Amino acid sequence: MLRKVGLILLIITIFTVTIASCGNTEKTTAAAPTTTAPATTPAQLTTTPATPAPSPTPEPITITDDYGRTVTIDEYPQRIISLSPAQTEILFALGLGDRIVGVCDYSDYPPEATTKPNIGAYDTPNIEAIIAQEPDLVLASEEHEAETLQLESLGITVVAINPLTVQEVLDSIILIGKITGQDQEAASLVSDMQRRMDAITAKTSQLTAEQKPRVFYIIWHDPIWTVGAGTFHDELIQMAGGVNIAGDLSGYIDISLEAVIAANPQVIIAGVGMGTGTDETYQFVATDDRLADVDARVNGKIYSANMDIVSRPGPRLVDALEVFFSLIHPEMQ
């Protein structure tokens, strides 16, 4: 199951390989019928210079990672490699930029991430490049089980982080702060994220069922991929005051066009930001004749959202919520 989820998340990542997500929260739109809601900028999420890291740890830190493995940290790491863009964003947000010695191809936010040594693609990291950097910590995700075993056999500490829900994203930030000696920075970041999320849910919690529109979030159009229960996207739609039309499904999953039409979404949000910068998925939902009669098309409520922002389970998760809220309930801004 994790492998399947990982493959879908990899599709998301590949589609966003060269989009400049460095502070860009704009929603790509086209000439098709649409109403543009105000965007939320991620500029509120700032990084701070790394503080001198204590070493060794006050006492050995033993954690259980998302592979269910027990990992012990004897010294706060000084040379960290990130194998996913979201983890790279977490490290920078915690002020650990100076300790990062390697990132994957798609780590493009914040801008400083692009200056770090490249250790290969997200799905195929280069083991030799990783070893050459002499890391004392590698942060992996669910796609990297084989690499984890290989690196561990070489005596390199690996911690797997694979958050699927909003709470798990927050927990992963706290965990990374704990094992790097940035506990206070992690707690502060999570507190700020929670404050911003609470500001939105305080509004949407007052909505009646009739005031919550049916929402279709589409990742890709050929075939059609969407999000079901057990994903942070499903939670974000609900927190933003919408009802996910695929909420009775589970995970990242394909859905038939007939099922979408039958659900008659009132708001459609298309993830955009592929490697070429095109918006094919948005164009599909905005122009395909078979969707001409769904409420979202009739009422001009078809939007696009930058997938660099709305699909990475890291600090910008709260930016994703603010984007969804602005699109689902522009009248509440």
Image (tube, grey):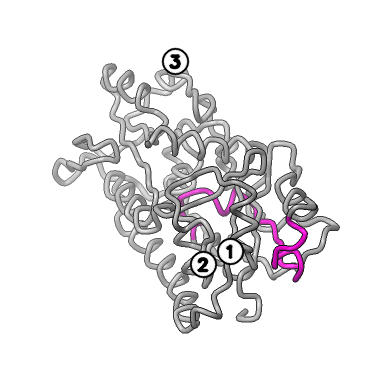
- Indicate the amino acid at tag 2: Val
- Indicate the amino acid at tag 3: Glu
User: What is the quadrant of the C terminus in the image?
Assistant: bottom right
For residue 308, the mark is none
| SS for dot 2 | strand
Residue that carries the numbered disc 1 in the rendered image = 215
Q: Are marks 3 and 1 in contact (CB under 8 Å)?
A: no
- Indicate the amino acid at tag 1: Val
Side of 75 relative to 21 (left or right) = left
Of badges 3 and 1, nearer the viewer stands 1
Side of 202 relative to 302 (left or right) = left
Between 148 and 73, the one lying in front of the other is: 148
Judge whether residue 296 is colored magenta.
yes
* Residue at x 55% of width, y 61% of height: 319
Upstream in the sequence, badge 1 or badge 2?
Answer: 1
Q: Which residues are magenta?
A: 291-317
Of badges 2 and 3, nearer the viewer stands 2
Tell me the distance, in whole angstroms, between the alpha carbons under discs 1 and 2: 6 Å
Side of 197 relative to 184 (left or right) = right
For residue 243, the mark is 2
Residue that carries the numbered disc 3 in the rendered image = 128
